Every structure is written in C-alpha cells, then in structure tokens.
C-alpha cells in the first residue's frame, strides 16, 4: 500500500499511527498496510503468536456463516456492520456465489475503509451492493441508509464480526445489537465474532494491553457468557457460542481443531 493521496473520495490516511484495520489486514496476509502497522502487528505476534490463526479463522467463519445463511437459511439480504478493509471472500462475494440475487450493504465509520469502498461495490447483475459511511453507535442511521438497498420488511442477516470489542461499555454494546435487531423482522439472523481470554488467559490479556497502548481504537475482551448475552431472545444456530474453528467446520473430523480466543455464534430472530 503506497498511495496515500487525498481526494474528495479518498480521505487522508495517517501512515505514522498504527491502524486497527490495517493491522488486521496484515495478519490476513493483505497488502493494505504500512510499516507502522506491521510493526504493531509483529509486537502482538510476539506475545500471542496464534493471532494470525485467530484472524484467519475469524475470516473463515465469515465464509461459512454467510454460506449457511444463503444456502440453508434462505437469506437474501445482508447488513455487514463494521466491515473493515476489503480482503478475500467479502460478504457479497460469498453470498452472491450461493445466490446471485443477494443484496449486501456494508457499514463502517472508518475513513480508510471508505477510501477502499469501491472494492465492496462490485455485484452480480441479479444482486446489489452498497456502502454506508456510518458509526455502529448510531444503528438508526445505518438502517435508514441501508434501506436504500435492503427491504426491512423481509429477513436480513446482520453481520458484526470483530466490531463489538471496540465498544467497551457492555450496556452500549447490547443496546447497539438490540436496536439493529429491532429494525429487522422475524426470520432475520445475527452473526457475531468476539475475542475472549478463556483459552490463552494472561497472554491474550497482555496482547490486548499492548494493542491499547499503540492503537487509537481501544479493544475489550468478553467471556463466552457475555457474548451469548448478545443473542438473548434469539434461537442460536447449532453449535451455539463456540471458538471459531468449531462453528460448522467443513470437515467431519473435529480431532485437532484447537480452541482459540475468538468465539462466534449465529442466532435467528
């Protein structure tokens, strides 16, 4: 990533400060990052080497969850909140491979993601994609803008991968999820990933402490019971709230699938 020019459609990019989306992009093997991001990413990897596997298993969960929602649950509308930088197998690509008529709206408040939003706006002729520049803390604004593309009288899958750890207050995080779910009808779904410390304990806690020293967006861990609380009132899709590699793995033999401190779940309204 070398082009940091500013235009009306490309906000200024600060290459002197580590950026959460660019660090995550580095762990995923992407190229949309700078030396300062790679340095911060390597610092985390020194404390928590499995962070690369965590990032990649979280991304793999996105693919499996979206395929499940499109192929088995019959969902044709997706609202991806806290999108992050485009990488491989973005939500619309997975959904539209399964059902070309799917409509997908991405929402993020990050100017860096806005600068790359065109990569998210490709679509099959039968479907449609859109990008909403809005903050997860304002669900009503997201829903209003997404209504240009999505029909909120029909089921919608709300995708919130890795966004809730950046909302430190538990009541605020739960309110955001509740208000988004209030906007969609019965038959809609919620998919979440969230970091914990139940597997690696002090090491992941130290990695988060170091992250919060260098990254501008503070990160917060929650335990599986707190993650499950986001699904109160929903019907959890089996296997429930589990470590990402264990959510509907794509092979039958679970032997060797180790737990990691990134948990996930899908629930139906």
Image (spheres, helix red, strand yellow):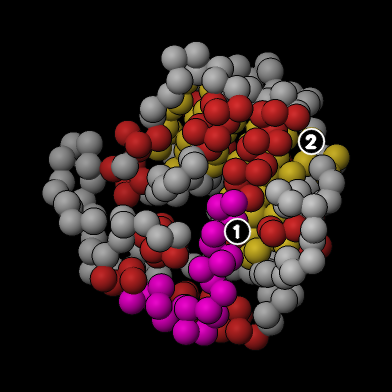
* Image side of residue 196 versus residue 12, left or right: right
Query: Vertically, is 228 above or below 216?
Result: above
- Please give the range of residues in magenta: 39-60
User: In the shown orientation, is residue 187 left or right of residue 89?
Assistant: right
Report the quarter where the C terminus lies: top right
Q: Nearer the viewer, residue 55 or 110?
A: 55
Q: Residue at x 21, y 51 (%)?
A: 12
Q: CA distance from mark 2 to mark 1?
A: 22 Å
**Quadrant location of the N terminus?**
bottom left
Q: Is residue 100 left or right of residue 124?
A: right
**Circle nearer the viewer, 2 or 1:** 1
Magenta stretch contains residue 55: yes
Nearer to me, 17 or 37? 37
Res. 198 in view: yes
Residue that badge 1 annotates? 57
**Which x, y percent locates residue 150?**
56, 20
Q: Residues within 10 Å of mark 2 (few under 14, many from 20)?
A: some
Give the quadrant of residue 229.
bottom right
Q: Residue 24 at what x, y percent from top left?
A: 44, 61
Element under disc 1? helix
Identify the residue at image location x=56%, y=17%.
Answer: 101
Mark 2 sits on what residue? 268
Q: Is residue 171 visible?
A: no
Q: Earlier in the sequence, mark 2 or mark 1?
A: 1
Q: Nearer the viewer, residue 228 or 75?
A: 75
Q: Position of residue 94 (x, y in %)?
A: 55, 35
At a point 48% along the width and 40% down the height, the residue shown is 90
């Amino acid at each position: 990533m070398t082009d940091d020019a500013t235009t009306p459609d490309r906000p200024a990019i600060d290459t002197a400060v580590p950026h959460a989306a660019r660090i995550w992009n580095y762990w995923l093997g992407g190229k949309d990052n700078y030396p300062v991001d790679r340095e911060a990413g390597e610092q985390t990897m020194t404390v928590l080497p499995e962070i690369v596997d965590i990032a990649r298993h979280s991304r793999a969960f996105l693919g499996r969850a979206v395929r499940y929602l499109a192929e088995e649950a019959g969902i044709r509308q997706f609202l991806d909140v806290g999108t992050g930088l485009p990488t491989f197998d973005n939500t619309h690509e997975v959904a539209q491979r399964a059902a070309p008529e799917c409509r997908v709206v991405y929402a993020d408040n990050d100017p860096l993601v806005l600068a790359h939003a065109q990569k998210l706006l490709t679509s099959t002729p039968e479907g449609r994609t859109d990008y909403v520049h809005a903050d997860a803390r304002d669900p009503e604004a997201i829903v209003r803008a997404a209504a240009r593309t999505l029909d909120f009288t029909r089921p919608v899958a709300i995708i919130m991968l890795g966004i809730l750890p950046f909302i430190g207050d538990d009541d605020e995080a739960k309110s955001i999820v509740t208000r988004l779910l209030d906007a969609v009808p019965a038959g809609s779904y919620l998919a979440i990933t969230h970091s914990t410390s139940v597997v690696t304990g002090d090491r992941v806690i130290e990695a988060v402490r170091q992250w919060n020293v260098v990254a501008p967006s503070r990160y917060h861990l929650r335990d599986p019971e707190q993650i499950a609380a986001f699904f109160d009132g929903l019907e959890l899709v089996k296997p429930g709230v589990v470590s990402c590699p264990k959510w509907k793995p794509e092979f039958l033999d679970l032997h060797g699938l180790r737990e990691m401190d990134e948990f996930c779940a899908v629930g139906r309204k």
